[in-house]
Image (cartoon, helix red, strand yellow):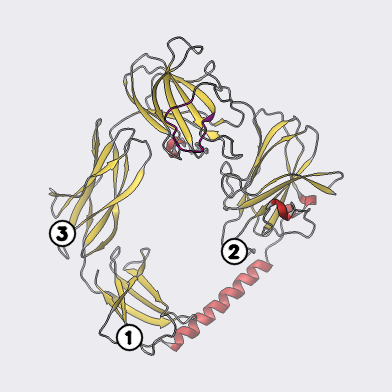
Amino acid sequence: MKPYPTALIRLKVLLLAALLFASLGFNAMALVPYNNCSGAIVIPATNAASFVSTTAQLDIRSATVSANDPPLPASQTGFDTNITHSVWFKFTPLVTGLYTISSGPDTDTAFKDTTMVMYRSTGDCGPFSIYSYNEDSGSLRASISTNLTAGTTYYIVVWVGRLSAPDTSTDESLDLQLRVSKVAAPSNDTCANPLIIPSTLTAPYFSPIIDTTLATTTAGLTPPCVANPGTVPSRDVWFRFTPSVAGSYIFSTGSDTSSILGNDGTLIDDTVIGLYTLAGGCGQTPNQIACNDNGFARAVLSANLTANTTYYIVVWDNAPSYVPGETALRLRVGPATQPTAETLPMLSISSTGAVLGANVNANGLLSRFWFEWGPTDSLGSTSAVRILFANATPFTTNIMVSGFQRDTEYFYKVVATNAMGRSAGSRMTFKWISTPPADLFFFQDVGGASQMEFTGEAFHNYLVQGSINLVNWTDLGLASTNLTQSPASFLFRHSPPPPAPAQFYYRLKLP
């Protein structure tokens, strides 16, 4: 097969048009006023105990690094000066205290890397002196935790960190949000003042968001389930629960802690949960019922509880120091139930096997799941059985099945079971279609690589092979697919290693 010169010309024309369009779009973009100190966004100052203000999301693609930007921290501090798109904020707190200024996971900032410096000024917009700075808090986004003085004006500058294409024509979303909070100790910081969980749970209970920045660490209460080196259970908060109905309950700080209203959940990366009884009250040594560390992750604990017995739940941040912008904690409590199972469309298929997908949730108890499949409604075949550990988080998974016939429709569904019961997903179908691909089109792109386009069956794996002599064939890889079209389109790009052979041959192998 030979390349088509017209295809090369067409690609070059399209590329030139795209570059011209991008250039015109960039030049037409107006600069934002908050790109310098005089246009700084004023953060309102209030007497609120914990939450001060949050700005709306800002599209800062038209912001630049201004020549009037203040000095950056010295190079020996390790501060990365590869930054773009400066945005200015101005804040004069009414109350002296500890504040968190964050562009991190507790905000709706849409890009992954930010850098932040806080300044003080002897005048209005200069000269500036550096007060505090951060470029990577827990994530790549910057957050600062520092004491501020009432009546003093602080200037906060946030820059975009490293970008794959650090200019205003980048396709990366550059929506910024800044959160400023005055930090206060949580009300449920001790055994004497726990947060009360309702006794009757008709649906999972979600606690309010708790900021653990200033939570204290209860002396003499070290959970024995923590065994990872470097982890230190710290800044614990307390809950109290007296269930009206006996049963198995789940206590979670995991990814399932976002409420049905879409509010944020736990942002602390590593948590620990302990479950206790206190027959003699808070002055006595607690009796531990259960404990979960969950490795370097957020803890999930399940336990069988007795009706009308009072239990205390203690949750720790499993680190010696808090991470600004990642101190939010939410506890989810709910009765354990039978697992939930949702059948998903197959992921891929070939003559050797079909990969079937599912969403499953153990709902707090050790569970098992598998696929049932077959050519009739009665199914008749089962896949391998997999274990699902006791947590309350939805889990997307897949299992491969094999032994089916070509051009024959098969039915399948996922099944899951635990001590509370069994559930099954809806029926779906798969079929290995042996019809050869069609509409083959071959050309070379502007980089000299060979490209092959064709149409075929959705989810099928088409293997591309190459040869220099039509005798010895080498597997080059699977063609990628676009499932938004019908029939599905496939593309394979190949750059032969230099020196490129005078003739190179390709063929498609049915899946």
Which one is in front, 506 or 262? 506
When the figure is inspected, residue 321 is found, relative to residue 108, above or below; the finding is above
- Crowding around mark 2 (Cα neighbors within 10 Å: few <14, some 14 to 19, many 20+) is some
Quadrant in the picture for residue 359: top left
Please report whichever mark, 1 or 2, sits nearer to the chain's N-terminal start.
2
Numbered tag placed on residue 403 in the rendering:
3
84 left or right, relative to 353:
right
Query: x, y percentage for residue 129?
Result: 81, 46
Quadrant in the picture for residue 255: top left
Please report whichever mark, 2 or 3, sits nearer to the chain's N-terminal start.
2
Name of the residue lying farthest toward the right = 123
Residue on which the image places disc 2: 170
Instruction: Please provide the residue range marked out in magenta.
Output: 222-234
In the rendered structure, are the residues bearing label 3 and label 1 in contact, judged by CB atoms less than 8 Å apart? no
Which one is in front, 374 or 367? 367
Element carrying mark 1: loop
User: Which image quarter is the N terminus in?
Assistant: bottom left
Q: Say which amino acid is labelled 2.
A: Thr
Give the Cα distance between marks 1 and 2: 40 Å
Please report whichever mark, 3 or 1, sits nearer to the chain's N-terminal start.
3
Element carrying mark 3: loop
Query: x, y percentage for residue 86?
Result: 70, 55
Name of the residue lying farthest toward the bottom = 502
Task: Please give the name of the residue rendered at 32% of the width and 72% of the height, measured from the top-left corner.
Answer: 455
Q: Main secondary structure of the magenta part?
A: loop
Quadrant in the picture for residue 487: bottom left
Give the Cα distance between marks 2 and 3: 48 Å
Q: Say which amino acid is labelled 1.
A: Ile
User: Which image quarter is the C terminus in?
Assistant: bottom left
Foreground mark, 1 or 2? 1
Numbered tag placed on residue 468 in the rendering:
1
